[in-house]
Image (cartoon, rainbow, N blue to C red):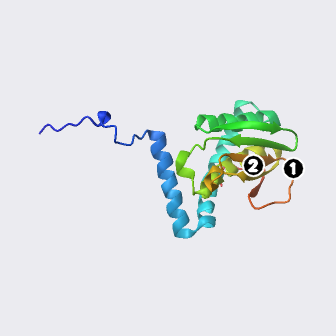
Amino acid sequence: MNISHDFEADKKLVSRDPAGFFAEMLGELSQVLQEAVGHDDAEGFTTIIAARMGNRISAEYSASQGADGLSVEALAAAMVHLKSKLEGGFSIVSVDDEKIVLRNSACPFGKHVVGRPSLCAMTSNVFGRMAADSNGYAAVDLEKAIARGDAECLVTVHLQPQNISQHMREYISRDDTDV
């Protein structure tokens, strides 16, 4: 039996590439977790994954520079570089010895992040681990988030101890690479 159909010519079909498929899958997984266990616990699961990935990513960027950590400027550039490789739209707003401020116009999870703010734990944890491993301390403030319905993300990575607000999470340097 020889059955064929030219699906490529069918313009009504939604196309999926591997990255889009995995972003959609993670978005759905996040939604199911949020509905099953609530936002806080779903964010907790995402935090564990992100912390593990953040440790490895931080070590890779530091090793690429042949150092135990990155300067503040190199750290900001590494954050933007990482997110650009993941098809995010991050750019540097400002950098100084106290904080790094980043703006994001396109989430790596695409449209699948909207309504799933627990996925923001990926950004917070990866950036927090990178900054804490280079600086000893970080507090990540997700002031705006596409996942929460904002038009863009505004992320401040504080490099000095802070009073923690609602959208902030603290990170301290550690020697191990596994959570």
How crowded pointer 2 is (Cα within 10 Å; few <14, some 14-19, many 20+) is rated as few
User: x and y percent of residue 3 in the render?
Assistant: 17, 38
Query: In the image, residue 13 lies at what x, y percent?
Result: 35, 42
Left or right, 82 with respect to 4, comes to right
Report how many numbered discs are placed on residues in the image.
2
Q: For the C terminus, which image quadrant?
A: bottom right
Residue drawn 55% across and 64% down?
Answer: 34
- Give the residue type that dot 1 points to: Gln
**Distance CA(mark 2)–CA(mark 1):** 19 Å
65 relative to 169, above or below: above
Q: Quadrant of the N terminus?
A: top left
Q: Are marks 2 and 1 in contact (CB under 8 Å)?
A: no
Determine which quarter of the picture holds residue 131. Answer: top right
SS assignment at label 2 = loop
For this view, does 132 lie left or right of residue 87? Answer: right
Instruction: Give coordinates of residue 151: x percent, y percent.
Output: 65, 47
Which dot marks residue 160?
A: 1
* Left or right of 129 in this view: 108: left
Residue identified by numbered label 2: 175
In this orientation, which residue lies closer to the viewer: 68 or 5?
Answer: 5
